Amino acid sequence: MSARTRDGRIGLAEGIALYVASVLGTGLLALPALAAEAAGPGSILAVAAVILLAIPLAGTFAALAARYPDPGGVASYVRRALGPTAARMTGYWFMFGVAAGGPVVAVLGAQYVALTAGIDANAVPWLAFAFLVVPLGVNAFGVRMAGGIQLVLTALLIGVVVTVVWAAAPAVEPQNFTPFLPHGLGGVGTAVVLYVWAFAGWEVGTHISGEFRNPRRAVLIGTAVTLILSGACYLVLQVITVGALGTAAGTSAAPLLDLAALADSPLARIAVGVIGAIVALGVLNAYLAAFAKLGASLAENGDLPRWFSTGAGAGAVPRRALALTAVVMVGYFTLVLVSGLNLAPFVLVHTSSMTAIYVLGMIAAVRILDRWSLGWWTAIVASVLSAGLLVLAAGSLLPAIVLALVAVVITLIRRRGAHRQRPGAGPVSTNTPSAKSDTVTPV
């Protein structure tokens, strides 16, 4: 099957690859260790729980993508169902909350380079800064990494998973699974929130479904294949990480490297390190480009100062919004350095913001999907599960709450201004529904 259909639209094979690339990414580089630190062997339960959560969530987005293909994604559905204030919250959560993941990816790439090349750990902050600066420079000149290269890197990462599982499976020891819940169910809850990072990306279908030749078929098959593949990769890798590394799993800076080291060949460790670093760099390239476009789109809708809207159009380079993105990323990066490269809090800010976005997205889906349809039922289930996940994420929700309050304050200010301009008139919304995307989800 060809990657693209003859009329130039996305074919089924490429569509499946895009789905896999959006869900299976840099989470493989660190999440097994972070989850093991939070919950020990109980992290396996966390992965299983997030897989179960992903089923109705992915099903709902598949229903939305098949029935209402809209490149605006989640924010477009939220705007349609819940209004401009909720859509503004969604955009802010992406731009200023989910963005906390950028420095995390940079540090992961730097750690894989340092450990593979034998560079002193003191150099990791400088390497991480380079991981941020290089993609910023590339994006400032409008250069993009080809989508095909991104997909090849994802395929290589899957190959790495197979390699490390093969290498480390003989080292699995039953005693490493006891005690199974060293930090109780609370630790499992924290690991669940951490693993939202791994399973974010299902909304990709809503952005690209209009480009499929047969959207309903491609979206459904792409969702099913990605659920099976990503779920299997993360679950097996978590079992192997805990079983082979034992208590050392929670302290590993690069769990894939430690697992690869169990193989007889030193080439396995080198390959894992090189591919891990390249994947991190590729993700950051797409990550920064997406957030720059997001910032320009928000400005164009009036949710950020209009000055940042330059470059919002297709093919244009949003350099002003890219500068804002750089400020946000450097701010988070500074906090990462102050924390001593403790990545878990920033992963939690990222994932709790994604959880808040998904809650609004699922509520919007309940309102706009046909009542009693299969998609409507999956949206009901996903709404309940996402709300429960939001409770688990309560400890890291402060940034999301602050951003939501800012969005509400902006609405109140605008309504007050509208009253002053037109005495006696009712409140006027300054945000009109638009086909432009308020949000762009990162790889």
Image (cartoon, rainbow, N blue to C red):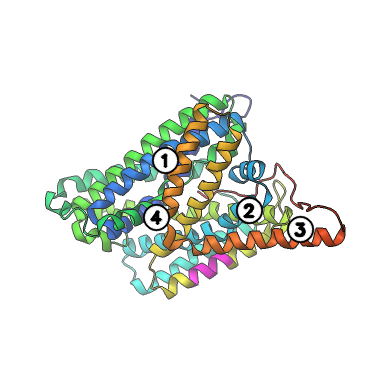
Which circle, 1 or 4, is nearer the viewer? 4
- Between 164 and 352, the one nearer to me in the picture: 352
> Which of the 4 quarters of the picture holds residue 199?
top left
Q: Mark 1 points at which residue?
A: 54
Task: State how far apart marks 2 and 4 are (Cα).
Answer: 28 Å
Q: Which of marks 4 and 3 is nearer the N terminus?
A: 4
Residues marked 3 and 1 touching at CB (< 8 Å): no
Labels 2, 1: front one: 1
**Which residue is painted at 62% across and 46% down in the image?**
75
Mark 3 highlights which residue?
Answer: 415
Residue 144, horizontal then vertical, whole percent: 59, 50
Residue 66 makes an appearance in the image: yes
Q: What stretch is highlighted in magenta?
A: 328-334
> Mark 2 and 4 residues: CB-CB less than 8 Å, in contact?
no
Q: Distance between the residues labelled 3 and 1?
A: 38 Å
Q: How crowded is mark 3: few (under 14 residues within 10 Å), some or many (20 or more)?
A: some
